[in-house]
Image: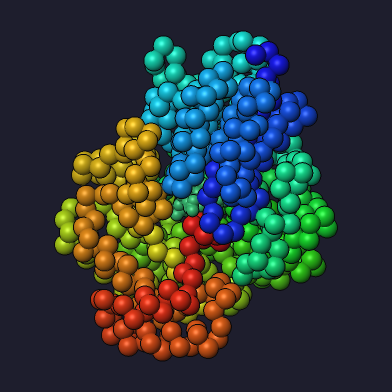
Amino acid sequence: MASANKILLFNPRAANHKARIPNSILQVAASINGRYDWVIVDGNREDNPEQKIMDYLNTGNFGFFGSTVMPGPQLKQAIPITRRVRKELPFVVNIWGGYFPSNHPKPVLHSGYVDYVINGVGDQAFPQLIDALLQQKDPGQIHNLIYLKDGKLIKTHKETLLSYDELPDLPYERLHEFYDIDKYLGKSYLGNKTIAYHSSFGCPFKCSFCAVVPIYEARWNGKSAGLIYRDIQFLRDRFGGDAIEFHDNNFFVSEKRTVAFSQLIRNDGMSWWGEARIDTLDKYKDTSLAAMREAGCKMIFFGAESGNDDLLRFMDKGGKQNGQQILRFAKRLQQFDIIPEYSFVLGWPADSEREALRQVDREIEFIKRVKATNPDTEIIIYVYSPVPTEGSEMFKKVKAQGFSFPQRLEDWLAPAWEHFDLRKNPLTPWLTPKVIDRIKNFETVLNAYHPTVSDIKLSPFKRRAIKAVAAWRYRLGWHRYPYELKALQKFWLKYRQPEIEGF
Ligand code: B12
Ligand code: SF4
């Protein structure tokens, strides 16, 4: 079908409530905008995205179906829909990109219905692949591609980084023709119309548990402050955006860029949030932290991970972060009225249930110390879920203990693997139900005794009430069977999980 060169880009449903600007797929759209005709289907904004996709493709004008895929719930739409496209329209080329296929290309390509995986950044690889396929050229010279040739997996050279400043602008106006952008700018702790913005590739560190590492191999490139500010001004003036969530893996790598952005935005009255490392931000000057707060930086997410220095070393946290620093830094941020949001990962690989329980108890004790040091600190708890960081000591230990990922793509749809992706129910041999219960029960008590400020629906009365009910448990360390708290939480509390239901 020579005329079938339109491209359908799909963002499978990832959020149950708050749909936000689908930056992954929008940036891919930017790479072909003006060169190829494209449409976008956002699963977060459609009741029946499958029907919509089939209606588009059945026009016969489309040659390419591209889907972005994170692990977890996005697979629930990406797998069956891509499979159906292959079955009913075998001439359409199916291309997946994003963290899941980049980190798990084998099951994806061996499924028989995904033809190409874009490995990491797609801004050059995607248009080049479309060009090659339309011109019937061998795609073997294109960087960042994974595909099967004669049943063999081919991985082309990996370009880990591109210069963000040289990328084309995101086609917001065109997205608005498909989906009203106002509805992407939701109410949050930060504001009434919160913009989701992504301003940098990668991360310069190599934590051994992190999915960003195999993709970017410890490299980072950020858009310059002036260009970020220009986009934010546009989204503010055109669509009424009044707050920003920076979706970068590590927004604060460059102090110079952060300060420059703060200076630009300081008079706009916009609140903002982003993700950082404790050791990086601890090196920032006091004047920089003050400038950030003055410019609207209200809260920062940090991977604190653990209070145990041996574990921090084991996870390659750069060797620069330690328990004392985590505590001290929580206090330091308090002076600047910036809320530290610390995430801890519990359930690291352990040789026995006893050891796993001991680790969990130590972390619980540490988290309580953090709260005592700066009660404003928000705590997020994850359960460790392995990612394929080949070569790291962590992943070696994980494999040695008998853990392996599913080999068939469909197997990722099993509820247990979905929960695994959500970092809630690991399929890791060392985490027995007893260990999981201990983590969950503590989480329940902690979130009742310290309800999150970001739950904007929780009234001061409910906040006080739930805290009072939980007080004895928190103080005495009696976390078992917290049924009364679970009942109250069900009605009142919404535990903040930045990457599950929104930041
Ligand atoms: C926004 C976001 C979300 C949003 C949803 C986004 C959406 N699509 O609607 C929400 C908050 C719902 C979310 C949820 C989850 N997320 Co999330 N999310 C992100 C975040 C912060 C930004 C994504 C983004 O917009 N990036 C900007 C774009 C430009 O970059 P990109 O996605 O990498 O895209 C480039 C390439 O990957 C490639 N590409 C990507 N897609 C495609 C598609 C095609 C066709 C092509 C050709 C190329 C291509 O080209 C793009 C341009 O270069 C990322 C971290 C990050 N900074 O990327 C985590 C991230 C992707 N999420 C992650 C995870 C694990 C989750 C969860 C599954 C679990 C959890 N507990 O966090 C949940 C799932 C919950 C659910 N209900 O689905 C992990 C994935 C790691 C992994 N193990 O593989 C990340 C990397 C965070 C992290 N560091 O751990 N997430
Ligand atoms: S600092 Fe954060 S994003 Fe960077 S490698 Fe470590 S966990 Fe991943």
Give above or below for 322 relative to 210: below
- Where's residue 62, x and y in %? 65, 24
- Residue 273 in sight from this viewpoint: yes
Would you identify the image quadrant in which residue 49 lies?
top right
Give above or below for 466 relative to 105: below
- The colour scheme is rainbow
Q: Which residue is drawn at 31% across and 42% down?
A: 395
The quadrant of the rendering that contains the N terminus is top right
Give above or below for 135 relative to 21: above
- Residue 157 in sight from this viewpoint: no
- Where's residue 311, x and y in %? 31, 57
Q: Residue at x 63, y 22 (%)?
A: 63
- Where's residue 334, x and y in %? 55, 76
Q: Residue at x 32, y 67 (%)?
A: 440
Q: In this view, does 127 lie to the left or right of 453?
A: right
The foreground one among 491 and 332 is 491
